[in-house]
Image (cartoon, grey):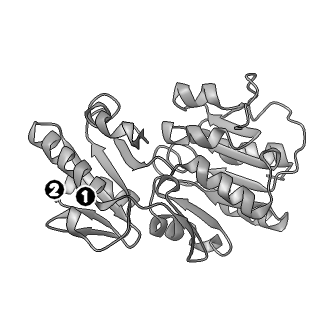
């Protein structure tokens, strides 16, 4: 049964009882990174302190594994990466778990996106494989957004014909994805997850794949309990992750549903909320 967090939130600047934390899991965009996609200045020092204490730090993101590995290259050894919204989990270059989509489902989602685009919606599909992300749309504005999150990316004639295990189909909508693209994919929600993962992003994945499932699998493998786990998130793709930890934190800038689901409230991503909270709870020196 999922852990039910206390409805009484506490900010990171409120005194919090010491905890035997062994696992820290954080979303990236809107959570660890500020609005300009910059990591907090003290990140590498905190990662070093966590490693010294035997605490595993795990990024959990909609970003691809190659992107996360590059961003954390100075401290990546031994780190677990929960990539592609939980569909791909990797440690030291070795796959721990994955949950690929059926190729027929990929083809159906891409067909729906092509139809939506033809109707006038400014949207494009990113087919996310283990080896690379694949796109058909080639305009600079779209590619700029894709390359922000997918270091390994290829332009192809037909994204449904690539030779790769496809983990998810991510859709970038230049408008509000929660009001346009997500409703247009409602038919897939009966059998798959249709997750709004950001203001402009919607992800289609297997029902069995999400960040929460990935965290629970990691907890089981390492013998770590929810009481020893701290998680941070800000958007709807972080909801299931909130249920895996007694120390669950929504950022002050989080979607209202995430704030309601979390046990605690952290300062915003633009106020170094993740690092401030880690230091506060674990008693780390600044």
Q: Residue at x 25, y 34 (%)?
A: 184
Examine the rendered structure and indicate whether residue 44 appears above or below residue 249. Answer: below
Question: Residue 40, image x and y in percent?
Answer: 61, 52
Q: Is residue 238 left or right of residue 188?
A: right
**Is the C-beta separation of discs 1 and 2 under 8 Å?**
yes
Secondary structure, mark 1, is helix
Q: Quadrant of residue 245?
A: top right
Frontmost residue, 144 versus 218: 218
Q: Quadrant of residue 143?
A: bottom left
Q: Residue at x 13, y 67 (%)?
A: 157
The numbered disc on residue 143 is 1
**Residue 272 visible to the viewer:** no
Examine the rendered structure and indicate whether residue 73 appears above or below residue 68. Answer: below
Frontmost residue, 36 versus 127: 127
Question: Residue 86, image x and y in percent?
Answer: 53, 55
Secondary structure, mark 2, is loop
Please state, as top left, top right, bottom left or bottom right, where the N terminus lies in the image.
top right
Residue at which label 2 appears: 139
Examine the rendered structure and indicate whether residue 132 appears above or below residue 198. Answer: below
Rounded to the nearest angstrom, the CA distance separating label 1 from label 2 is 6 Å
Frontmost residue, 285 versus 84: 84
**Residue 253 visible to the viewer:** yes
Examine the rendered structure and indicate whether residue 8 appears above or below residue 50. Answer: above
Question: Residue 115, image x and y in percent?
Answer: 13, 43
Q: Residue at x 77, y 33 (%)?
A: 13
What number of labels is visible?
2
Question: Residue 103, image x and y in percent?
Answer: 30, 61
Mark 2 neighbour class, 10 Å CA radius: few under 14, some 14 to 19, many 20 or more: few
Q: Is residue 154 left or right of residue 229?
A: left
Q: Quadrant of residue 54?
A: bottom right
């Amino acid at each position: 049964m999922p852990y039910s967090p206390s409805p009484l939130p506490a900010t990171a600047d409120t005194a919090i009882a010491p905890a035997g934390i062994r696992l820290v899991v954080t979303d990236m965009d809107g959570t660890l990174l500020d609005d300009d996609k910059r990591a907090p200045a003290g990140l590498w020092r905190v990662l070093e302190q966590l490693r010294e204490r035997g605490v595993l730090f795990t990024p959990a993101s909609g970003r691809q594994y190659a992107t996360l590995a590059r961003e954390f290259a100075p401290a990546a050894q031994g780190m677990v990466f929960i990539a592609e919204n939980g569909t791909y989990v990797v440690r030291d270059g070795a796959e721990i778990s994955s949950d690929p989509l059926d190729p027929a489902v990929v083809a159906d989602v891409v067909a729906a996106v092509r139809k939506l685009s033809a109707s006038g919606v400014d949207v494009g599909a990113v087919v996310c494989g283990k080896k690379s992300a694949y796109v058909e749309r080639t305009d600079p504005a779209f590619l700029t957004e894709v390359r922000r999150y997918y270091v390994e990316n290829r332009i192809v004639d037909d994204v449904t014909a690539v030779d790769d295990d496809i983990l998810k189909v991510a859709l970038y909508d230049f408008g509000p994805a929660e009001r346009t693209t997500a409703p247009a994919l409602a038919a897939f929600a009966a059998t798959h997850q249709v997750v709004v993962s950001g203001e402009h992003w919607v992800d289609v994945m297997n029902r069995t794949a999400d960040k929460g499932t990935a965290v629970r699998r990691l907890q089981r493998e390492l013998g770590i309990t929810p009481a020893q786990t701290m998680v941070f998130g800000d958007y709807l793709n972080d909801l299931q992750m909130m249920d895996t930890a007694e120390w669950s934190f929504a950022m002050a800038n989080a979607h209202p549903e995430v704030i309601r689901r979390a046990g605690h409230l952290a300062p915003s991503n633009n106020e170094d909320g993740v690092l401030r909270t880690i230091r506060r709870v674990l008693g780390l020196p600044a």
